[in-house]
Image: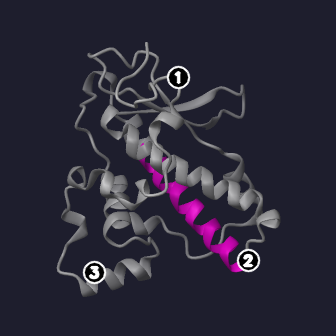
Amino acid sequence: MATIYFPESRPSEHKLAALIEDCRKIELAPDHQNEASSWTCQVVLGFDAKGGLPQVAWFPSDYTEVISAFVWRENTIRLVLQFHMELRVTKLMQDNLGRILQYMDAILCCLAQEAGNVASKDRDPKWGCKVFDSYLAIDFFVGRHEPSMVRNFRRQSDLNIDRVDVAQIGQKSHIFQIMPPLTLMFPSYYRLEGACRQP
């Protein structure tokens, strides 16, 4: 399901520059200690062109770690593309990373749009986005997101990745393998032990 968003070709130079410029930021909501609020993960998606106001999406607290890992990966790709000359990244790698960045942007935009359609009073802590869950399942079971790789996996495996409960995958997903611990990503909210949040 998520692979329908994977682009067939590299984004244009203008589109790629815009994607590199749109650096995401994850924050815990100011009221993250409020037990009544189950949607405490907020993502700054970018800034409004008119007034420079941040465009913020809210997600269930259960999504905090996996969205943090997703955004960390996305921002790492942005840095590699931004400094491709210094890093001596090949043209082929730049093209592939550009496609991956465009794909990840489409997945996050889909996730934000679906979450934005949920009224405040209807925010369920167990809410999920099928497209994002599909991304996570593909990441865990296939390890690559190119449609050809996913098709090969489907042909060779008896597992239907569209019916996997992603809650069971959790931190086993590849998306967590190279991400720094959340204590480094949210130093103002987590103590060094990483077990509890600071007031």
Does any portion of residue 1 appear in the rendered image? no
Residue 96, located in which quarter of the rendered image? bottom right
**Which residue corresponds to the image point at 47% horizontal and 50% vertical from the top-left?**
70
Give the percent coordinates (x, y) of residue 190.
44, 26
What residue type is disc 3 on?
A: Arg
Labels 3 and 2 touching (C-beta < 8 A): no
Q: In the structure shown, which secondary structural element does the residue marked by tag 3 occupy?
A: helix
Disc 3 or 2, which lies upstream in sequence?
2
Labels 3 and 1 touching (C-beta < 8 A): no
**Which residue corresponds to the image point at 61% horizontal and 54% vertical from the top-left?**
76
Which residue is farthest front? 193
Looking at the rendered image, the disc whose residue lies closer to the viewer, 3 or 2, is: 2
Q: Eyeballing the image, is 145 above or below 63?
A: below
Disc 1 or 2, which lies upstream in sequence?
2
Q: Eyeballing the image, is 66 above or below 150?
A: above
The CA span between labels 1 and 2 is 38 Å
State the predominant SS element of the stretch in magenta: helix
Q: In the structure shown, which secondary structural element does the residue marked by tag 2 occupy?
A: loop
**Which residue corresponds to the image point at 56% horizontal and 76% vertical from the top-left?**
8
The residue labelled by disc 3 is 154
Looking at the rendered image, the disc whose residue lies closer to the viewer, 3 or 1, is: 1
Q: In the structure shown, which secondary structural element does the residue marked by tag 1 occupy?
A: loop
Residue nearest the observer in this picture, 25 or 111:
25
Asked if residue 10 lies left or right of residue 31, the reply is: right
Give the percent coordinates (x, y) of residue 31.
41, 15
The residue labelled by disc 2 is 90
What residue type is disc 2 on?
A: Thr
